[in-house]
Amino acid sequence: MNKFRNAGLARRLSVTLLIIALATFYACRGWALGVTVDATCNIYGAGHAPPNDAPSVGSNGGGIAPAQISLGDLGNPPALSLYATGTISYCPSCGNNGPDGDGLIGAEPSYNGISGVTNCPERCLMAVFTSATEPTNPAPLSLDFAVIGTDYTRLAPQLNQMFFIGNGLSEPGETPQVIQVPAGATKLYLGFVDGNGYNDTPDWYADNSGSLAVTIATSLALRIDFSTGRPGIWVYGGSGSTNRIEYTTTLPATSWTPLTNVVLNTVPTIWYDATFSGDSSRIYRAVSLP
């Protein structure tokens, strides 16, 4: 798991992002993580200890444990956004597909305390939040994506309730989808559903290949571009949201100076700091406004 150059600080009443610029070099503190999700990652292993972290109901392979992200490493945020790229294949003759799946729609069953899903793209990237308590039956109800839609803007899953991630973007416009973190969640798991016609799920992971690269970030995120000689602040967040950009020159800070409010009519939106005059250090943060 690698830390990406993004930033995030969770606050009690708002989401705050912090980014540090030092002359022509910047270092970012805070919260965005990158993880590789192998095509053999078994989402039904979420929250379970070995050998149940890669379960199989048949003899064709339960794959490996799902990719695991500690929410503490992200500052225990109230919401997340994900972005996935890459291709996977479910068998040597199946061809490749991206994070959104292969275009077929199916229903996957619950297993060992983890819910299934209904009317969801097959072979797509899935996710589950768990708590410190190992999942047990009965599992939560399955989410129906014929009702929700895969282009949702915001989703609030329960603990142990599987949900569709895909590439993490809502069409049209490729707006980052926002996932609300359920109360009590300590970990996020990423993986796939597989089985023989999905009737004997989980199974048949052994012939899968490929992987996805996934970035997991707090739902408000910043990136800095210094290529023009002045800081350009890229702001990522919910479409239509308003976020105040502030700065200070030292940490710990006793006060922050407001610079501007950025309305995300497009995501991301870039704002250039015309007040920057070659400070030896400038620390930026974004505060999500009501």
Image: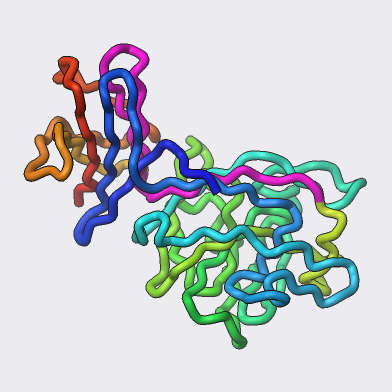
Q: Is residue 238 left or right of residue 136?
A: left
Q: Is residue 266 visible?
A: no
Q: Work out whether 87 lies above or below 43.
A: above
Image mark count: 0
Which one is nearer the viewer's eye here, 76 or 153? 76
Identify the residue shown where x is 11% and y is 35%: 258
Can you name the residue that lies furthest to the left here? 254
Judge whether residue 154 is colored magenta: no
Identify the residue shown where x is 71% and y is 46%: 211
Q: Work out whether 136 lies above or below 272.
A: below
Identify the residue shown where x is 56% and y is 66%: 128
Judge whether residue 210 is colored magenta: yes
Q: Is residue 236 left or right of residue 277?
A: right
Which one is nearer the viewer's eye here, 114 or 225? 225
Coordinates of residue 53 in the picture (x, y in percent): 68, 71
Q: Is residue 120 visible?
A: yes
Q: Work out whether 178 lies above or below 267.
A: below
The stretch of residues the image draws in magenta is 209-238
Identify the residue shown where x is 14% and y is 20%: 275
Q: Is residue 278 left or right of residue 94?
A: left
Which one is nearer the viewer's eye here, 39 or 102? 39
Colour mode of the rendering: rainbow
Coordinates of residue 264 in the picture (x, y in percent): 31, 36
Quadrant position of residue 183: bottom left
What type of secondary structure mainly makes up the magenta span? strand
Can you name the residue that lies furthest to the top here? 228
Quadrant position of residue 136: bottom right
Coordinates of residue 129 in the picture (x, y in percent): 51, 67
